[in-house]
Amino acid sequence: MRTAVRWLLAASMILAGLSHLFWGRREFQNQVPDWATEIAPIDKDGIVVASGAVEMMLGAALVALPKERRRIGTILAAFFVAVFPGNVDQWLKHRDGFGMDTDAKRLARLPLQAALIAASLWSTRR
């Protein structure tokens, strides 16, 4: 079961990363909090591209680096923690994106982050 969850996470991260770079790029830019560009030396598009690249690397690493599985799982969990403030900001500022077009949907999405963190850690432990 852990292997299936890890592979599902890997595929999801690679797909999400690709969407950051191609078909979902503008939509992701709308989801980047304004304050993120104040603390990062790049614009919203740069943040989207960088996070997409990180997502693809983490997804690939989950399956390509079995000896580093635990470390990659911890890094992936930290990544999910790092992007959580953006999800909260999207909810608080009523920003639409990827079907999150109501406050109820945006709020319902927030607990999903905890599930992703748990799955990242659980699926990479023996």
Image (cartoon, grey):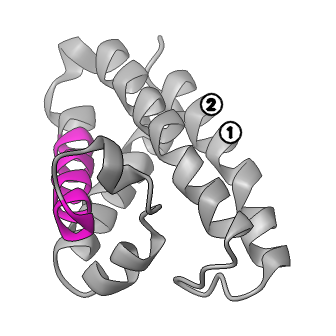
Residue carrying label 2: 118
Q: Is residue 122 magenta?
A: no
Horizontal side of 112 relative to 45 (left or right) equals: right
Kindly give the residue lying farthest to the front in the view shown. 38
Q: Is residue 24 above or below residue 61?
A: below
Disc 1 residue type (three-letter)? Ala
* Whole-percent x, y for residue 86 in the image: 53, 55
Disc 2 residue type (three-letter)? Ala
Q: Is residue 22 above or below residue 59?
A: below
> In the figure, residue 91 lies in which quadrant?
bottom right
Front tag of 2 and 1: 1
Is 2 in front, or is 35?
35
SS at circle 1? helix
Q: Is residue 80 above or below residue 123?
A: below
Circle 1 residues within 10 Å: few <14, some 14–19, many ≥20: some
Q: Is residue 35 above or below residue 74?
A: below
| Residues drawn in magenta | 43-60
- x 17%, y 73%: residue: 21
Q: Are marks 2 and 1 in contact (CB under 8 Å)?
A: yes
Circle 2 residues within 10 Å: few <14, some 14–19, many ≥20: some
Which is the main secondary structure of the residues drawn in magenta? helix
Residue carrying label 1: 114
Q: CA distance from mark 2 to mark 1?
A: 6 Å
- x 29%, y 67%: residue: 15
> In the figure, residue 48 lies in which quadrant?
bottom left
* Whole-percent x, y for residue 77 in the image: 47, 30
- x 47%, y 14%: residue: 125
> In the figure, residue 29 lies in which quadrant?
bottom left
* Whole-percent x, y for residue 61 in the image: 19, 34
Horizontal side of 24 relative to 95 (left or right) equals: left
Quadrant of image for the N terminus: top right
